[in-house]
Amino acid sequence: MSKKKKKIQETTIENYYDLKVDKVDELVAALKDDEYDGEEVNFEMTANMGFDDPSHYTKTGKARKFNPYKIDKLAKVPVWLKALFVKFWFSGVVCYFVMMGLGVYLMYDDLDMLVIVGIVMGIVNDVFVNPVFRYMESDKREYNNFMMLPFPFKQFWTFFLNIIYYLIVVIVVNYIYTFINMFIGGLPVEPILFGIFAIIADMAFIGIKDLIVYLVKRRKNKKSEVATNA
């Protein structure tokens, strides 16, 4: 790639992420009736949707209005609850379609079943779960505490690391079943319990990882403080 072409691309990217300050000022002024001299902003759905629909009106016949600051119901749900539910749901799906679906063919080979389930779990988390977390997160990256590999951009090598990691998670889940069966016996492998056990094993490893990261950062901060005060 020539230097000229590369320079043009970089300029284009920079311009793309430029903050249009003048547009922001216009929007702020538009929301303040006393400071805006232009056309009055109409928040009624009937005026902005381009078509008329019964859902655009209240029961009393008044036109519904947009509320740009309205917080949706999903945003009010705690992050930890949404994260655990997503993990639980996808783990249950893997159990239902892989363990219960392929169990007829692999019922006599537990090792093959564990390997297949671990591989599928790794793929599902890399392709579906983590992107869902990235879609729901804010600039605070609050879902990083629920991912083993919380990288902001999808990396090729994380695909294989997730597979290896969830192979370990599935093995731990298998040991949980074995331990419980030592006392009660005959515990069935079904989506709900499997999802719960998968969350327990997954979050235990992620908690250990987060603790290590915290301790390393804390040690670095202390060293930097000592170096600054010296």
Image: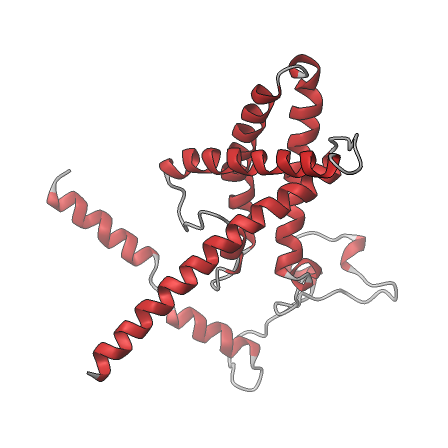
Q: Quadrant of residue 72?
A: bottom right
Give x and y (percent) for residue 94.
64, 31
For the residue pair 4 and 41, the one nearer the viewer reads as 4
Q: How many marks?
A: 0
- Residue 124 vs 14, above or below: the answer is above
Q: Which residue appears farthest toward the bottom when viewing the image?
A: 34
Residue appearing at x 56%, y 24% in the figure: 116
Q: Which residue appears farthest toward the left when viewing the image?
A: 3
Q: Quadrant of residue 173?
A: top right
Q: Quadrant of the N terminus?
A: top left
Residue appearing at x 67%, y 49% in the figure: 85
Q: Which residue appears farthest toward the right when viewing the image?
A: 60
* Viewer can see residue 87: no
Residue appearing at x 67%, y 31% in the figure: 95
Give x and y (percent) for residue 86.
64, 46
Q: How is the image coloured?
A: secondary structure
Give x and y (percent) for residue 135.
53, 50
Q: Quadrant of the C terminus?
A: bottom left
Give x and y (percent) for residue 118.
55, 30
Residue appearing at x 51%, y 51% in the figure: 206
- Is residue 216 rendered to the left or right of residue 163? left
For the residue pair 123 and 66, the one nearer the viewer reads as 123
- Is residue 158 rendered to the left or right of residue 33? left
Q: Quadrant of residue 112?
A: top right
